[in-house]
Image: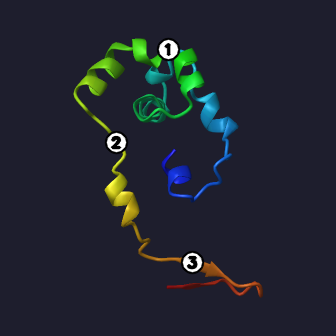
Amino acid sequence: MVAQEKKVFASDFASPLWESWLVEDCFKQEHWLFGYEANRQGWLGQKVRAAKLRQEPSVKALTEAGVTFVNVKQIASYLPKKLVVHGGGGGGGEYF
């Protein structure tokens, strides 16, 4: 996934929760966007195949139209507006 490619997560990072979203008919459920991008980006290939995402008419249409919801350029330049840093003393955090 993008976070692994950018070395935000370890290369062997796994999320059982995210993987659990990839089931048959997942494109008709609340995590359809993750399923679509997993299919489009080549993430979790075995789970995507088992979920039969490539057979979904909507997935086919979006893929053929070149639709993606992941903007890698935007991710590369992302900087949070506020960063909360917690100290060890329990007095809250500082904003930068």
Residue at point 76%, 84% (across, down): 88
Q: Is residue 73 left or right of residue 96?
A: left
- Mark 3 crowd level (few <14, some 14–19, many ≥20, 10 Å Cα): few
* Image coords of residue 61 (percent x, y): 27, 20
Q: Is residue 53 left or right of residue 60?
A: right
* Image coords of residue 33 (percent x, y): 42, 34
* Image coords of residue 8 (percent x, y): 57, 59
Query: Quick check: 2 above or below 25?
Result: below
**Element type at mark 3:** strand
The residue that label 3 is drawn on is 84
Residue at point 49%, 85% (across, down): 96
The residue that label 1 is drawn on is 52
Q: Of the residues shown, which amino acid type is indicated by label 2?
A: Phe
Q: Of the residues shown, which amino acid type is indicated by label 3?
A: Val
**Element type at mark 1:** loop
Residue closest to the eye, 14 or 94? 14
Label 2 and label 1: CA atoms lie apart by: 20 Å
Query: Quick check: 83 above or below 37?
Result: below
Label 3 and label 2: CA atoms lie apart by: 27 Å
